[in-house]
Image (cartoon, helix red, strand yellow):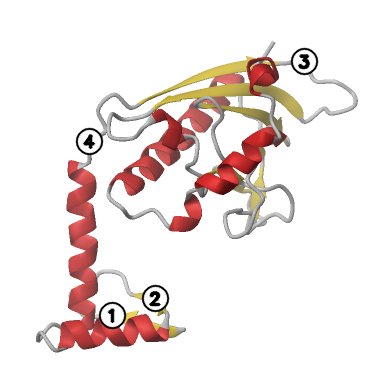
Amino acid sequence: MRCVNVSESKVKKAISVRFDPVEYANYSAMVENAGVAVSDGLRYLVTEKLQQAEGADMKKFHISFDFRWKERDVAFPEHIGNMLVTVTPPRELSVDFLQRLIFVIPEFWDDSGSGLKETFRIDSAYFHRVTAEPHHRISAKASRNVLSFHLLKSRWRAAIFDYGSGYKEGELEDRIRSAVTSHFTQTIRLYLIDHLPASRVLPEELFNEMMSFRDESTLDQMMALG
């Protein structure tokens, strides 16, 4: 991989970007032969994508949340509730294709004074999880559950776990709603401007194979919060 540092006096933040060496050679030859510096070309790409994102048609996009809190039990005292998220796609994204987009569960880490601590988390029901390579995502901070998931019938069922956060139910709802809404919104926006990595979309063949193991007639019952 070729590592390129984009750092100039006019740039407020310097970053290091890794490129495939062949792709980098082809790109640098293309822009430099046109009299454009590689760093300028990359900045133009960022500006172009931001402009496309601003103009993306998100009309009719809607996301709703249903939270159900439960009494703590002896077996799983951290499991304090469940939620069901329902998504209506924007008009430029079909309902069928929405089910193939791969989303990533937001994580909630707070500074405890002695380092970052995961005070609460949300976790997908097993039937939403995406575990196939190269599509699955796992936490970089905690060696545990898979973070990647996809919707079923435009819905996502997840459990809520609390590890002594001290937050009230309303505060947890606000933090979860904000993070999840932002993630769904920006993931869909990236897809609409052709900027979502291919690994974040389930190939149709793989999606059909995954669905073949699920009984669609029981999905409503499986996702019901009770």
Residue 147 picture location, percent across and down? 62, 46
Disc nearer the start of the sequence (3/2):
2
Q: What residue type is labelled 4?
A: Asp
Q: How far apart are marks 4 and 1 (CA)?
A: 33 Å
Give, as a three-letter code, the residue at label 3. Answer: Glu
Q: Nearer the viewer, mark 2 or mark 4?
A: 4
> Which numbered disc, 4 or 1, marks the residue that appears first in the sequence?
1
The image shows residue 104, relative to residue 59, as above or below, that is below
Position above or below: 51 against 211: below
Residue corresponding to mark 3: 71
Q: Which residue is drawn at 66% across and 17% down?
A: 217
Q: Residues within 10 Å of mark 4 (few under 14, many from 20)?
A: some
Q: Earlier in the sequence, mark 1 or mark 3?
A: 1
- Could you tell me which residue is drawn at 32 percent across and 43 percent down? 189
Q: Which of marks 1 and 2 is in front?
A: 2
Other-residue count near label 1 (Cα within 10 Å), few / some / many at <14 / 14–19 / ≥20: few
- Three-letter amino acid code at the position of disc 2: Val
Q: Which mark is residue 17?
A: 2
Q: Is mark 4 on a helix, strand or loop?
A: loop
Spatial CA distance of label 1 from label 3 is 53 Å
In this view of the protein, which residue sits in the foreground, 82 or 153? Answer: 153
Which one is earlier in the sequence, the residue at label 4 or at label 3?
4
Q: Where in the figure is residue 160, as x and y percent of width and height?
A: 67, 29
Q: How many marks?
A: 4
Q: What residue type is labelled 1?
A: Ser
- The image shows residue 148, relative to residue 83, as above or below, that is below
Q: Which mark is residue 201?
A: none
